[in-house]
Amino acid sequence: GAVVSQHPSRVICKSGTSVKIECRSLDFQATTMFWYRQFPKQSLMLMATSNEGSKATYEQGVEKDKFLINHASLTLSTLTVTSAHPEDSSFYICSARDGQQAFFGQGTRLTVV
Amino acid sequence: GENVEQHPSTLSVQEGDSAVIKCTYSDSASNYFPWYKQELGKRPQLIIDIRSNVGEKKDQRIAVTLNKTAKHFSLHITETQPEDSAVYFCAANNQAGTALIFGKGTTLSVSS
């Protein structure tokens, strides 16, 4: 199947700093990518849909100025968590579809201290 | 928007027994229903999916059934093994037809 690569897999940052997470589709082009957040023992919650060459679409309750998404090429989407706070600590996972099937990145464990 | 409900939240079975997980969805326009298995700290792995033009699909010990009229679909695992222990998520595509909306997950424990 298709491969989606996410980097970094783990990051620890200080409160108030920003963290960038990259999501790449390695063997297919993705005009659309998706960002999810998963808290411990909970489900994957859709945060936003990343659209190549245009603005991302955010789900209700997700602050677009806090979670900046850039999708500058057909194989790369980035999520930047700005001014991170401890409550932003979570597992962030990206996804891209090749046809109808969705493929997921490895996930990024973000810890804000 | 699309809402996916999943039951049960936890399921414990003996090795060799069958396990059934059920999901309902709200948007009648949804047409793609995958099931994922997720181990702790790892990405979800697709185990089986079904499209709305099919009522049932089987892959070895795993099967999925879909009732479009009732808007529910189910995962069936037969002859369970300890390595089947994980969290299972159902999903359905959203109104735009692109993103997947997930159920809350079922923690399956298979004891030997």
Image (cartoon, coloured by chain):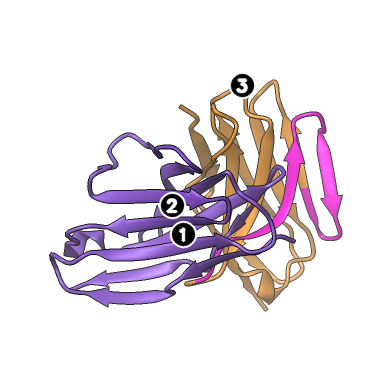
Chain colours: A purple, B orange
In the rendered view, would you say B80 is above or below B92? below
- Disc sitting over residue B28 in the figure: 3
The residue under label 3 is which amino acid type? Answer: Ser
Camera-side residue of A24 and B39 = A24
Amino acid bearing label 1: Ile
Q: Nearer the viewer, residue A82 or B82?
A: A82
Can residue A27 be seen here? The reply is: yes
Q: Residue at (16%, 73%) from the top-left corner?
A: A14
- Residue A5 position, x and y percent, is 56, 67
Query: Which image quarter holds the N terminus of chain A?
Result: bottom right
x 33%, y 75%: residue: A11
Instruction: Give the magenta part as a residue range.
Output: B42-63
Name the foreground residue: A53 vs A13: A53
The residue beneath circle 1 is A93
Mark 2 vs mark 1: which is more N-terminal? 2
User: Same chain for the residues at labels 2 and 1, yes or no?
Assistant: yes
Question: Relative to residue B12, is residue B25 depicted above or below?
Answer: above
Give the spatial CA distance, label 1 vs label 3.
27 Å
Q: Mark 1 lies on which chain?
A: A
Answer whether residue A38 is magenta in the image.
Answer: no
x and y percentages locating residue B20 in the rendered image = 67, 50
> Are there few (<14), some (14-19), or many (20+) residues within 10 Å of tag 3?
few
C-beta proximity under 8 Å, tags 2 and 3: no
Compare residues A11 and B112 and report the one nearer the observer. A11
Residue drawn 17% across the image and 62% down it: A85
- Pointer 2 residue: A36
What chain is tagged by disc 2? A
Q: What residue type is labelled 2?
A: Tyr
In the displayed structure, does residue A40 sit left or right of residue B66?
Answer: left
Instruction: Say what secondary structure mark 3 lies in.
Output: loop
Q: Is residue A17 left or right of residue B44?
A: left
Contact between marks 2 and 1 (CB within 8 A): the answer is yes
